[in-house]
Amino acid sequence: MDKYLLGIDIGTSGCKVALFRPDGSAAAQSTGNYPVEYPHPGWAQQHPDMWWEAACGCIRRVLEESGADPAQIEGVGVDGQSWSAIAVDEQGRVLTPTPIWTDTRAQAQCDGLRGRIGEEELFRCCGNPLQPSYTLPKILWYRDHMPEVYAKARWILQSNSYFVYRLTGRASQDLSQGYGLSCFDMSKRCWDTALADRIGIRPELLPPLYQCHEIVGNVTEEAAAQTGLAQGTPVVAGGLDAACGTLGAGVVKPGQTQEQGGQAGGMSIAVDEYAADERLILGCHVVPDQWLLQGGTTGGGGALKWLRETCCPDLSFEEMSSLADTVEPGCEGVLFLPYMAGERSPIWNPAAKGVFFGLDYMKGRAHMIRAVMEGVAFSLRHNLETAKAAGAQIGALRAMGGSANSLVWTQLKADITGHAIEVPSSDTATTLGAAILAGVGTGVYASFEEAAERTVRVQRIHQPDPEKKGVYDAAYQRYLELYERLEPMMKG
């Protein structure tokens, strides 16, 4: 009987579900959408129940399309967007919409925490600067502004652990999502409950920690009825979407690097030594005994999606790429700062804004499209150069996400960063990574190295064009200067 592995991706704009064979080929895929709510400035929230409903529909469609017997699925892996703060009660009911990773409502809680405990002590524990978009300040925001929610909460879950809870009835917190909580000891990979108490949150809100490939539980009768999965199917803890995508792109050894081309942008470098740097993000890799030194930006593929929805609704992404290719490198002086929801690393400015600079009557949509692509690539270069300054060794980049489908954009990123970019199966990297976790956890694969060897195949390679280096070096310096000059105006 054939074996399958199921990967579920709880993304920002929608979910993806894919059923994989052990060789990494997809037997069937399905997507479902759900909205983001912006009820107040700085707020961005979603309803986790909508994630569940959308993914249940996707699972049923995948099973129907593939014709697979649910009993043939060896295990389920779930990845999800970062920095959720899903408050659930004793019965697992969601108590309020969750602030998502672009939500910055908890700035006052960050300021207060810095005054009481200090940034240095928090950084020593978790290896990351305190930011309002992270999970822990959101918990403090609940305590201060929704005391009834805080009082009723039994667990604070992440996006993937919420889904695991719905499947199994068991609460969990995978290691790769720990970096959004300042009481997670990043070097020891455990909770610092004494620090949690000093911070002012109840330590019992923190779920039990699991390795990302560790089996948390099995599909319950109720979940089987809603999803179509077989009751008793093993479910692993899963992990952060970027970390699972990193695995799905074949990054399983120290020094290998992933380039992220989903809704958000950035990169993830696998390291086997603890290497916290306040300018970057440090998280546990989904591969045991490794960390990911990450650069995370708010303006990735989502910036181009925004441009399409607002200015180019008549164009497909393929047509937008073709238009961008008609403009010379450097975009004839047009620059774009891709800070569409504030910005994360390396500038860490929640007040940063998106900016077009250099427009005139001679410029059109093609210039704006290319400027967005170049701006996202400049933000990637900014993070890569920061990582190099921190001592990281970076070779070729493994691309993942929908942006990697654009040959124009991928080549442009190679030219701007000066790094070769290898493209595996970009559309399935994240769900494949989640499925690989299930495969290792259930014994389908003996190791992560074997899993990557069996499932990940590079489809094409983009080498940087040295003739374009001078143009892009100059444009990059103007990109950095533009933000530096505008930054004082972004504080209001």
Image (spheres, grey):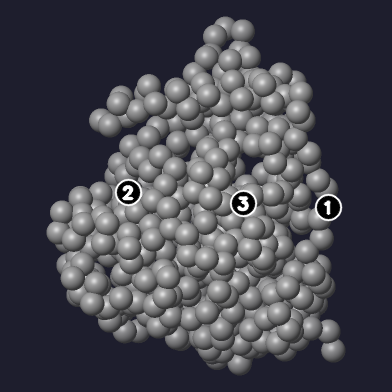
Residue highlighted by disc 1:
459
Pick whichever of labels 1 and 3 is earlier in the sequence.
3
The one of 491 and 42 positioned closer to us in this rendering: 491
Q: Look at mark 2 in the image and give the residue it sits on.
A: 104
- Label 1 crowd (10 A; few <14 / some 14-19 / many >=20): few
Q: Position of residue 405 (x, y in %)?
A: 74, 45
* Viewer-nearest of discs 1 and 3: 3
Identified at 37% across, 35% down, the residue is: 352
Quadrant in which the C terminus is drawn: top left
Q: Position of residue 407 (x, y in %)?
A: 77, 38
Q: Is residue 484 left or right of residue 70?
A: left
- Tell me which residue sits at (67%, 44%) in the image: 403
Which of these two is toward me, 419 or 442?
Answer: 419
The amino acid marked with disc number 2 is Thr
Is residue 275 at all visible to an observer of this figure? yes
Q: CA distance from mark 1 to mark 2?
A: 38 Å
* Residue at 48% in and 81% down: 210
Q: Quadrant of the N terminus?
A: bottom right
Q: CA distance from mark 1 to mark 3?
A: 24 Å
- Judge by depth and name the residue closer to the eye, 234 or 200: 200
- Amino acid type of the residue that numbered disc 1 sits on in the rendered structure: Gln
Give the structural element (helix, strand or loop) at label 1: loop
Total tally of numbered discs in the picture = 3
Residue that extends furthest to the top in the rendered view of this protein: 361
- The residue under label 3 is 393
| Nearer the camera: disc 3 or disc 2 | 3
Q: Kindly give the residue lying farthest to the front in the view shown.
A: 391
Which residue appears at 25% of the width and 49% of the height?
Answer: 107
Q: Residues within 10 Å of mark 3 (few under 14, many from 20)?
A: some
Where 306 sits versus 476, above or below? below
The answer to whether residue 361 is above or below residue 397 is: above
Disc on res. 3:
none
